Image (spheres, rainbow, N blue to C red):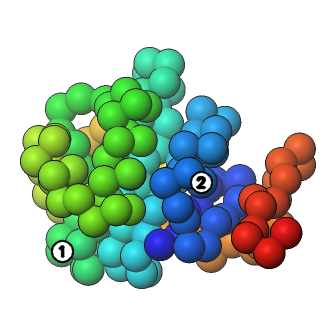
Amino acid sequence: MKLEFASGWRIEDLTEEDLYAEDFEEEEYAILSADDLTYIQCARSNEQECTYFLEYQDGSLERHFRVGGRLVPLDRVLEAFRKYLTGDDSWRSDFAWEPMGLDELTSSSPEDDSETRRRVLPLKRFGRRPPPGRKMPRRPWD
């Protein structure tokens, strides 16, 4: 699986160790993807420190869900990402998920930051260059 951040930082073939080594608090969003249409993602909230919106998509826009009614603390986001990465499906029952309608997925107003009408995070393809001040992760052959 691949982990991508808003800054453009990307880790291919992510491990649990890599996941916990990353500084999520410095990023606006993170996407852990199995493929272009199957992923879990979080976006930092401006409402409360160290809380996030959490969403997942399961193969198509029609199967896009978010945690309803509340923000998720970072430790629970990391646990959901870890479970998703390792194939532990219990992350699905750890939260009350609600489907997102297509109108919410295609909202065109970037200023609209409300929980019910915010834009879905774009799944982007980033370059393999670390952002300023960050080092490339160690590889087994380094």
Residue placed furthest toward the right: 132
Q: Which quarter of the image is occupied by the C terminus?
A: bottom right
Q: Is residue 93 above or below residue 73?
A: below
Q: Please name the residue that numbered disc 1 is placed on.
A: 62
**Residue name at image x 30 percent, y 53 percent:** 83
In this rendering, position of residue 78 left or right of residue 68: right
Q: Secondary structure at mark 2?
A: helix
Q: Residue at x 80, y 75 (%)?
A: 141
* Name of the residue lying farthest toward the top: 48
Q: Which mark is residue 18?
A: 2
Residue 101: give x, y in percent of width and height: 18, 62
- Mark 2: few, some, or many residues within 10 Å (few <14, many ≥20)? few
Please, what is the three-letter code of the amino acid marked with disc 1? Glu
Asked whether 142 or 118 is in front, the reply is 142
The reply, left or right, for residue 47 in relation to residue 125 is left
Q: Amino acid at mark 2?
A: Asp
Q: Is residue 42 above or below residue 38?
A: above
Per the image, label 1 sits on a secondary structure element best described as helix
- Could you tell me residue 30's position as x and y percent? 52, 53
Foreground residue, 28 or 129?
129
Would residue 113 be visible to someone looking at this image?
no
Quarter of the image where one finds residue 11 = bottom right
How far is disc 1 from disc 2 in space, using C-alphas? 31 Å
Residue 115's spot in the image, x, y percent?
Answer: 31, 38
